[in-house]
Amino acid sequence: MNKKIVHDALVLTAFTLVLGLLLGIVYGITKEPIAEAEKAALDEAYRVVFEEAETFEEDDSFDAEKAAEALASSEYPNDEITAVNKALDASGNVLGYVLNVTSHEGSQADISFSVGIQDDGTLNGYSVTTISETPGLGMLVTEEPFYSQFENKAEESYDVVKTEAAADNEIQAVTGATISSRAITNGVNACLVYFRDVLQGGN
């Protein structure tokens, strides 16, 4: 009986080691393509929200902890700035910034998207990179009728309303998807807080 237990344990251990080795090999093979696909998706998002930019350059001054501190003291502590890129013209001049933000307020899961902000604070809009909201409801925040409400506006912040927007700082929610609409809106607001308080030094 003891020999059988030892034998079974050895077989299980060997199987586990082989499986671990195989998983490691698969990870090594797929890691780079996955990373390249993710980068391509982000590059496309940057282009969508800053068409006039020639190139994008990672902002070396970005500090995730400082970003978290700025949002913790704002009205948007459930949002997370994950990266900041400078949008540059052909001469290397800064036209504005593209901020990557993750909202933890989605109705189904986190929503990640990129927000383009011109140097004067005008919004170019946003482009969603990761979303799992309900098809036909929350997913509609990725479509033009909703996202166009943010474009070419320069308000300090935006509020979600259920009726037709009556002011430039009002964003009409997708019918039946107020949570998703608010998640996007608060994420945009979080980016504006970081833009003003950190990138512009509170100006």
Image (cartoon, helix red, strand yellow):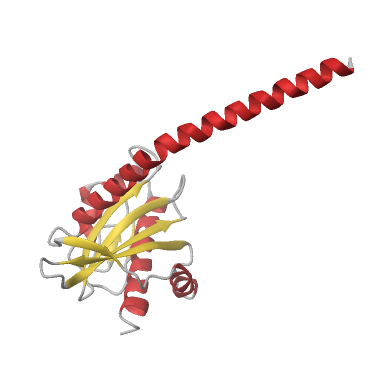
Residue situated furthest right in the rendering: 1
Q: What x and y, as percent, mark residue 100?
A: 34, 59
In the rendered image of this protein, does residue 146 appear above or below residue 89?
A: above
Res. 37 in view: yes
Residue 72 appears left or right of 120: right
Q: What x and y, as percent, mark residue 127?
A: 27, 53
Q: Quadrant of residue 156?
A: bottom left
Q: Quadrant of residue 7?
A: top right
* Residue at position x 38%, y 70% in the image: 62
Q: What x and y, as percent, mark residue 33?
A: 34, 39
* Residue at position x 45%, y 48% in the image: 107
Foreground of the two, 162 or 71: 71
Residue 2 appears left or right of 199: right
In the rendered image of this protein, does residue 10 appear above or below residue 39?
A: above
* Residue at position x 30%, y 57% in the image: 114
In the rendered image of this protein, does residue 57 appear above or below residue 27?
A: below
